[in-house]
């Protein structure tokens, strides 16, 4: 089976960078459903006919953008994990990365993908159930060893709780609460439920230094 990276490398050869960047910007600013191929052609300063010579359909473009973002997220998170020995510092640096992304994502993106682009949404679910799950579990085990998280927590159960709660911010439309603000509250909720006094002290020191 080909890897995601392999698939993306093939697609990068047939989707011009300017189309990808314009499409991604539109998806983030107005949402996936609200972005039409007419809008994209207008932003590019070309006709829709010319645009369709470069890409077959919008679904392919959406899929490519999702694959690209997932690959970038995985690389960023792995880099943080590899460079950070302390579990709480790792948690907060990853949180800062995700928080920054949520601030630029249009609130409707999740629902747009679920309803209209199930293949692309399935890739996000796979990313959640494999990569994100492993990352959360590893951080929990690291924190327990370092005396920052309680030893009596059920790692598998807490992993699943944190995993599903971390996707909760994507369900908010931004009218009452911004997804990025919801994410920070979920982060604190998850952390204080499992932290030791030592972990709480370190968390409260580090969160002042790491911008969220």
Image (cartoon, grey):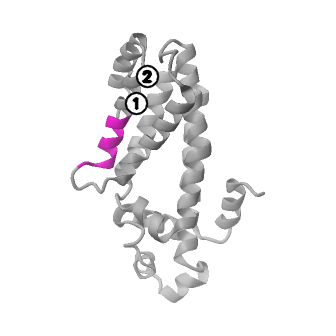
Residue 181: in magenta span: yes
Which residue occupies 60% across, 52% down? 126
| Residue 210 visible in the displayed image | yes
Image quadrant in which the N terminus is located:
bottom right
Quadrant including the C terminus: top left
On the image, the x and y values in percent for residue 20 come to 53, 66
Disc number for residue 190: 1
Q: Is residue 153 placed above or below 125 in the rendered structure?
A: above
Q: Give me the residue at 58% from left, 46% from top.
A: 129
In the rendering, at what x and y percent does residue 145 appear?
Answer: 57, 14
Query: On screen, 7 above or below 199?
Result: below
Q: Say whether marks 2 and 1 touch (CB < 8 Å).
A: yes
What's the mark number on residue 194? 2
Query: Most extreme residue toward the bottom, as rendered?
Result: 49
View extreme (right): residue: 1
Q: Secondary structure at mark 1?
A: helix
> Which range of residues does the magenta coloring cover?
177-186
Work out whether 87 lies above or below 106: above
Which residue occupies 21% across, 51% down?
176
The answer to whether residue 71 shows anywhere in this view is no
In the depicted view, which residue is nearer to us: 74 or 175? 175
Q: CA distance from mark 2 to mark 1?
A: 7 Å
Q: How many marks?
A: 2
Crowd rating for badge 1 (residues with CA inside 10 Å; few <14, some 14–19, many 20+): some
């Amino acid at each position: 089976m080909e890897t995601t990276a392999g698939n993306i490398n093939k697609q990068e050869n047939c989707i011009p960078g300017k189309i990808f960047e314009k499409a991604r910007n539109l998806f983030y600013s107005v949402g996936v459903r609200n972005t039409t191929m007419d809008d994209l052609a207008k932003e590019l300063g070309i006709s829709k006919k010319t645009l369709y010579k470069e890409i077959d359909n919008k679904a392919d473009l959406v899929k490519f953008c999702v694959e690209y973002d997932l690959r970038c997220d995985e690389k960023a998170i792995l880099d943080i994990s590899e460079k950070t020995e302390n579990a709480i510092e790792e948690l907060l640096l990853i949180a800062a990365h995700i928080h920054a992304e949520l601030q630029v994502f249009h609130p409707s993106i999740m629902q747009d993908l679920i309803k209209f682009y199930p293949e692309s949404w399935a890739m996000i679910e796979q990313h959640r159930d494999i990569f994100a799950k492993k990352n959360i579990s590893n951080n929990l085990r690291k924190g327990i060893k370092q005396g920052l998280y309680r030893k009596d927590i059920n790692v598998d159960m807490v992993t699943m709780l944190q995993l599903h709660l971390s996707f909760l911010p994507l369900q908010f439309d931004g009218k009452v609460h911004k997804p990025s603000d919801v994410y920070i509250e979920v982060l604190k909720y998850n952390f204080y439920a499992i932290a030791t006094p030592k972990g709480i002290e370190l968390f409260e020191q580090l969160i002042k230094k790491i911008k969220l």
